[in-house]
Image: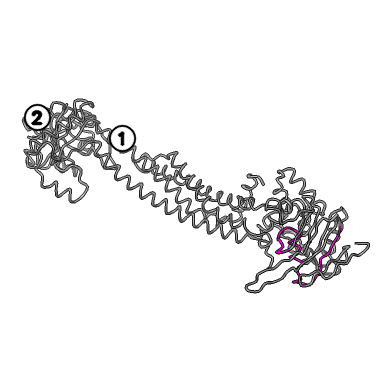
Amino acid sequence: MSILETNNVSKQYQMGKVTVNALAGVDFNVEQSEFVAVMGPSGSGKSTLMNILGCLDTPTQGCYRLGGTDVRDLDDHQLSRLRNREIGFIFQTFNLLPRANARQNVELPLVYAGIAGAARRRLATSALDRVGLVDRTDHKPNELSGGERQRVAIARALVSDPSLLLADEPTGNLDSGTGEEIMRSLNRIWMEGRTVIVVTHAEEIARHTQRILRLHDGALVSDDRRPGDG
Amino acid sequence: MGLWEAIRMGCEALQANRLRSALTILGTVVGVVAVVSVVSITQGLNRYVSQEILSMGSHIFSLDKYGFITSNEEYFEAARRKDLRSDDARYLQDHLTMAAAVVPTAHYTVDVLWEGRQAKDVALVGIGSGYAALGDEFDIACGRHLTYQEEATRRRSAVIGSDIAEELFGAVDAIGQRMRVGRESFWVVGVLKQRGAVLGTSRDNVVLMPITTFESIYGSRRSISIIIKAASPAVYEACQEEAMLLLKLRRGRQPWEPPDFGVQNSETYYAFYSRATSLFYLGMIAVVGLSVVVGGIVMMNIMLVAVTERTKEIGIRMAVGARRRDIMMQFLIEALALSSSGGILGVLLGALIAVLVNVLSPLPARVEFWSVFVGLCMAVGIGVVAGVYPAMRASRLAPVVALGYEK
């Protein structure tokens, strides 16, 4: 069953007088429990696609269905709920709140899910435990290394147990060793049965996945399914 | 997201920016301080003045040439009037049917001496012998009152205020002493009870003498005032009407004409006083209004800056599931937390000012509950008005824009 489905999804930006086609009619489906890489040079529309898939942005034309629902039919309340429960997002720049410590950052989705204090702390701590940071719960982001920050971000993405994990260049700001570690984490997350989509421009990252979508100038140019290892 | 959660987050954000938070609430603090302290002081003043006016005696009024002068025009108009004389007082004494006492008084300022000691600028009062009926401010501490006999024979007898007794005679018994009043020599026959001070001016620096003696020394061509006490509170109004009618006719005016003399009673004092304090209140409203507007604008600006600075944070929150409502609430609560802490600070400072005034001045200033209430409501109002627009701006950001993706 398709967890998500794009149908002729396009996105145009107005940059002054110039109209930029970030996405020009992208069609693909992603099945439950797939591990997908989205690749392409910078400016190919990868991040735009990711934002649309993560319900942070809406397509100008075309239709995006998530779990069978056209997101155009959803209001802010329902979209927020999707982002909160169904989607975990990992960013290149981690996007942690600088004033909050690791645990508070991980708790953030639960705050908006309306989960109260003690239960929230417990869930956040166990999520941090899963990424191996249980001894770093009280550290602020600036007291953590890049890899640790990204692992806090992963814990935050997973804490509300979403079925879909979106990672936008998750290793872009990390050295290759740490990047490799993060990719192994994503692999584990996928093995747990989640759908994982990762945006990257590095082949060695894409190597971890089962399927590679290649974008060029906002259009899908190839869709390679690779049998096997992941 | 729960309300408690939002409040906790708001307070954290404010703590992260202490100096800015403090500057932001300055306008609110000033406004609330103004409300609380000015209301406390004015109410204190009100209580003080009404006490003083009540102590004048409630059914007493006085007639004089000038009345209550509040402008130059009034003064020049009044100066052309006929003087009031002690024979007018005698006439009223003989013809008023509802008066318990009719007491003429005349005033002068002199120095008083006794055995080389001097009391300067003493209020000299020539007074009719019925004065003892006017109220407890003429109560005698020792010795006796001036008598009708002394008035009739223009005796050089004096009743002195407690300040004079202390300054001139000290431990010596003043009764029976002979002192110099101006150039004249007087017997002290009595000492008044201490009356205290009104707004810093002592009312005990006084010498009373028979009105007749006063006129024989200082002349009878000066205008006097006539203090009249009604026989009872019930006939107070009627007694005033009667006195005014009699005096108008005696001065050759028709009953329907306005009086060409002044009538003063506790109401006229109070009316004047209320007019003065209403100006004070207007001034306060202007100060408060100004600080509310300034405070509101400053706060809105700072909140807008905060929204701009924290765009990324807003994006992150939206990405993990914050609704627009949650973002709106977060910034609104921050504004409210700011302004209400300004309100609380203002109340505390205002109360401190009231306490200081109470301790350091004769005004019995007291913090009024309603002014605290008004001050806090004002602070909350500023928070809501100044917070809504920035909060709306924050909540309307598109998540992808807030996260800072280049378009």
Rendering quarter of residue B173: top left
Q: Which residues are magenta?
A: A34-61
Q: Is residue A15 above or below residue B191?
A: below
Q: Amino acid at mark 2?
A: Glu
Give the residue drawn at x 18%, y 34%: B160
**In this picture, residue B194 sits left or right of residue B151:** right
Report x, y in % for residue A118: 73, 43
Q: Amino acid at mark 1?
A: Gln
Report x, y in % for residue B296: 49, 54
Disc 1: host chain: B
| Element class at badge 2 | helix
Report x, y in % for residue B151: 9, 31
Quadrant occupied by the C terminus of chain A: bottom right
**A126 or B374, which lies in front?**
B374
- Whether the magenta-drawn stretch holds residue B238 is answered as no
Whether residue B176 appears in this view of the structure is: no
- Same chain under badges 1 and 2? The reply is yes
Rendering quarter of residue A149: bottom right
Name the residue carrying label 2.
B150
